[in-house]
Image (cartoon, rainbow, N blue to C red):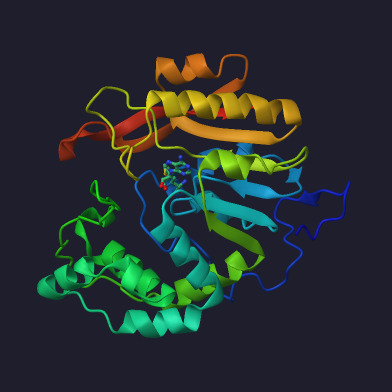
Amino acid sequence: MSRVARGQYRLFGDTGDPGHSPPGVAAGPFLKWAGGKSQLIRQYSPLFPMAWRTYYEPFLGGGAVFFHLQPSPAVLSDITEELINAYVVVRDKVDELIAALRVHRNERDYYYTVRAWKPESLTSVQRAARVIFLNRTCFNGLYRVNRKGQFNVPFGRYSNPTICDQAGLRAASLALRGAENYAADFEKTLERAQAGDFAYLDPPYNPLSATSSFTGYAEGGFSEAEQRRLASVYRRMDRRGVMLMLSNSASEFVRSLYTGFRIVEVTAKRAINSKADGRGPIPELVILNY
Ligand SMILES: C[S@@+](CC[C@H](N)C(=O)[O-])C[C@H]1O[C@@H](n2cnc3c(N)ncnc32)[C@H](O)[C@@H]1O
């Protein structure tokens, strides 16, 4: 449902939709997400294309790049259903969501009670409020599920977390107005992209060593076979004329998957091993076909 006429490109930043964010509040991620790209936006800025038709982000997570660009129209998807439900509710039912979030409180026993709620027994608004509440109050703001798909992160013991960021949620809601959101595997979403569209791809990273990286967002993780499947979809979309920007770790395996494309190194501060003192600047790759 593109509002851009065929043959006409929308310039970056020109959303054609005045009043996209309420005055004074910039829209940004409303969930803290493992692998979030907020810290890399400054290094990414010169790498975005100048213009495109429809924007695709099929590994959405916290959506740092989407909120930075605020493109419209946009197709935003992720395999994690609870995450996508939260986006749809922020977009369509932000007042109800704010009311539902106000009920929640930062207490240990209460946290474990809400964590045990079964998403399928809740309304979409209650589900979104639960995910945002758990994300704001859990240990490290990490989204992690066990083999049964249940959220299993312990209580975080923050002294005074903002559970309901009303202005931030309203700004995010406005930014999402031109967006289509649904839960899907990346390949299904990318198949829709056409020549002149732009896709930003941020898969779970290929680990630098067997124990170095967290890739278990969803059941099944993201194996080397998945990285290979993504690289072959990347090549197919490249032949179709879709502009592609992909983030991944600076491993030899990743470089070998994308030989022939432009590879730019950026520097990220990431946990480089499972110990807390292992944080430091490490190189990451951005793979571009334009
Ligand atoms: C590195 S995170 C994206 C982070 C995001 N760019 C941000 O700024 O917060 C990778 C995302 O890929 C999703 N994912 C994992 N496997 C997927 C698949 N097969 N198809 C679509 N999404 C998938 C995960 O749920 C996770 O949200």
Q: Position of residue 179 (x, y in %)?
A: 63, 61
Q: Is residue 168 above or below residue 247?
A: below
| Residue at left offset 57%, top offset 53% | 76
Q: Nearer the viewer, residue 99 or 287?
A: 99
Q: What is the quadrant of residue 24 in the picture?
A: bottom right
* Quarter residue 280 falls in: top left
- The quarter of the image that holds ligand 1 is top left
Which residue is at 24% across, 70% downward?
117
Q: Is residue 69 visible?
A: no
Which image quadrant for residue 173? bottom right
Of the 4 image quadrants, the one containing the N terminus is: bottom right
262 w.r.t. 165: above or below: above
Of all residues, the one furthest to the left in this rendering is 109
Image location (x, y in percent) of residue 227: 46, 27
Quarter of the figure with the C terminus: top right
Q: Is residue 75 left or right of residue 273?
A: right
Q: Nearer the viewer, residue 259 or 279?
A: 259
Coordinates of residue 87 in the picture (x, y in percent) = 49, 64
What x and y, as percent, mark residue 202?
49, 39
Residue 233 seen in the figure? yes
Report the label total: 0
